[in-house]
Amino acid sequence: MAAGAAPRVIDVRERHEWDIARIEGAELLPLSEIGSWWRTLDPDEAIVFVCHHGRRSSSVCLALAAEGYTALHDLVGGIEAWRLEVDPSMQAY
């Protein structure tokens, strides 16, 4: 990500979670609003989905893969894993 060649990072948590902790450069598209945004995504764009622990982002990847999206990735362990492994200064919740 620091080199500028990063995939698109979409955080599917809710706004109140995003307000506590987020990955710099990620964009918020809440899972609760998926019906209004999933068709706007490029089916071939590399996207990493993020949530708190990985369950919601994994379900988004599975659902979009079933619709023909091809370059989807789930941040295993979610933002909590990111906090523990990459940015320990991030607030836990």
Image: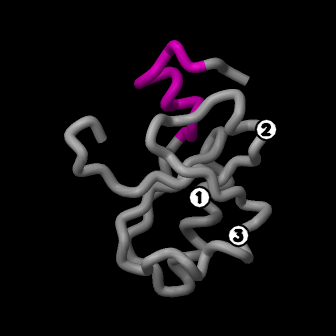
Give the CA separation, mark 1 to mark 2: 20 Å
Q: Which residue is mark 1?
A: 58
Q: Examine the rendered structure and indicate whether residue 61 appears above or below residue 91.
A: below
Decide which of 32, 81 is in the foreground and name it: 32
Q: First in sequence: mark 1 or mark 2?
A: 2
Q: Tag 1's secondary structure?
A: helix
Locate residue 2 relative to residue 88 in the image: left or right.
Answer: left
What's the residue at 43%, 80% (across, down)? 43
Residue at x 39% of width, y 77% of height = 70
Q: Quadrant of the C terminus?
A: top right
Task: Provide residue 3's location: percent of width, then percent of height.
Answer: 20, 40
Lateral position of residue 20 relative to residue 65, left or right? right
Q: Tell me if mark 1 has few (under 14), some (14-19) or many (20+) residues whose alpha carbon lies within 10 angstroms of its own.
A: many
* Residue to which mark 2 is pinned: 16
Structural crowding at the residue carrying mark 2, measured as other residues with C-alpha within 10 Å and reported as few (<14), some (14–19) or many (≥20): few
Element under disc 3 = helix
Q: Which comes before the other along the chain, label 3 or label 2?
A: 2
- Look at the image and give the residue range highlighted in magenta: 77-90
Residue denoted by label 3: 34
Question: Residue 41 at x, y = what percent?
Answer: 50, 75
Q: Residue 86 magenta-drawn?
A: yes
Return the residue nearer the eye: 89 or 67: 89
